[in-house]
Amino acid sequence: MNLKMSTNVILNIFIIFLVLKTVTELVLNVLNRSEVLANKDKVPEVFRSVMDQATYDRSVEYTLAKNRFSSIETIYDALVLAFIILSGFLPWLFYGLQNVLGTSLLAQAFTFLIITVILSLFGLPFEWYSQFRLEESFGFNKSTLALWITDKLKGLALMFVIGVPLIWVVLKLFTQLPHTWWIWGFVFLFIFQILMLVLYPRLIMPLFNKLEPLKEGELKDRLMKLARRTGFKASTIQVIDGSKRSGHSNAFFTGFGKFRRIVLFDTLIEQLTPEELEAVLAHEIGHYKKGHVPKMIIISAICTFLAFAVIAWLTSKAWFFENFGFNSASGMVPVLILFVLLSSLVTFWFNPLMNLISRKHEYEADAFAKKEMDSPEPLILSLRKLSEKNLANLTPDKTFSAFYYSHPTLIEREKAMRRD
Ligand code: ZN
């Protein structure tokens, strides 16, 4: 009787959280859609010099198409998660795999990864549609089905090569140090994350893309001069062939300390003038100079620590296993799977906070670029051009952008840079 009652409570809490998140996502989409529709007929005055009418119409169409797609995907994802959690599918899959593979630590690591792969299959049709229908119809898709499948298979192989040893170590700690395993697990994973910051651009990115040092010439001289001027000793500036998969353009910054590197998309180099590229690079160097990388590492470490604490707490709670259809002697893997599936129901609500921090960093990097370029104009011009080329939504809803945008909107960035 007692168990039955708590079963209802736990599963009801799950349903309430799932409905709350799904409804919020749909409402945010509706808000954004109506804001775009309200501005759809004419390019708003402030954006006359950013987009012509034809491009603006296209950006509205693109935003609305993505909005529709996102709402359908949100509903589908909620139904899939409800099915996975409430139907008994998960324990059935887990014990089925356990019967075949056994219960050794290695088998448990494989069980976890195989279940993760099977669960990810539910989203595959949407990924395909997004790339080959949605992006395709706006000219952004540059990938082929063969390349897309190859990417998926490489990702899968990588997941097992990295994931099996990683999970094996955590499971080993769990069996050897029943009380303190989660602290050691956190330390281990934290070191792994730091290592990945260094290794990812060196070992993993090259598996998917070609990275080349920026060619000698006016552009490189200009960028290296900026790097020297700002005290950012860049060993190389690399160019990645992003055009292989997508027409969208970007620049990013990875690593830290002497492992830092700046990567420019080839599409970006095509779209911007050398002066505009210099401003974009100044912005990226701004992230480094303002200490954004260590700040983000600390935030990520806190999140990882909390995740381990929650997982450790749950592995000792029989009611948690039982309510989701597992018996409490099933080890840590069911808790890990449930954690992966359910944590976004809680972390979703922290999106606005994380994006607030991210947008604050963007403003700081913009201000740095403005100072280094002696003028806000080059960066503003490049941001305008990128908005145009990427068919960015120029009129997002305020609540929507507060929730989802890791970067301030174009108008917000211009205003901040033109102030003082
Ligand atoms: Zn930035």
Image: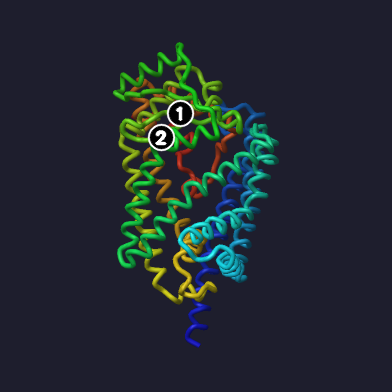
Give yes or no for contact between labels 1 and 2 (Cβ–Cβ under 8 Å).
yes
Residue at the image position 61 percent from the left and 56 percent from the top: 118
Q: Position of residue 210 (x, y in %)?
A: 53, 28
Q: Position of residue 260 (x, y in %)?
A: 36, 31
User: Which residue in the protein does label 2 denote?
Assistant: 254
Q: Indicate which disc residue 81 carries.
A: none
User: Which residue in the protein does label 1 denote?
Assistant: 263
Mark 2, secondary structure of its residue: strand
For the C terminus, which image quadrant? top left
Mark 1, secondary structure of its residue: strand
Left or right, 258 with respect to 398, comes to: left
Quadrant of ligand 1: it is top left
In front: 35, or 72?
A: 72
Amino acid identity at mark 1: Val
Left or right, 251 with respect to 58, comes to: left
Q: Position of residue 162 (x, y in %)?
A: 47, 47
Above or below residue 86? Residue 111 is above
Report whether the residue tagged 2 is closer than 8 Å to ligand 1.
no
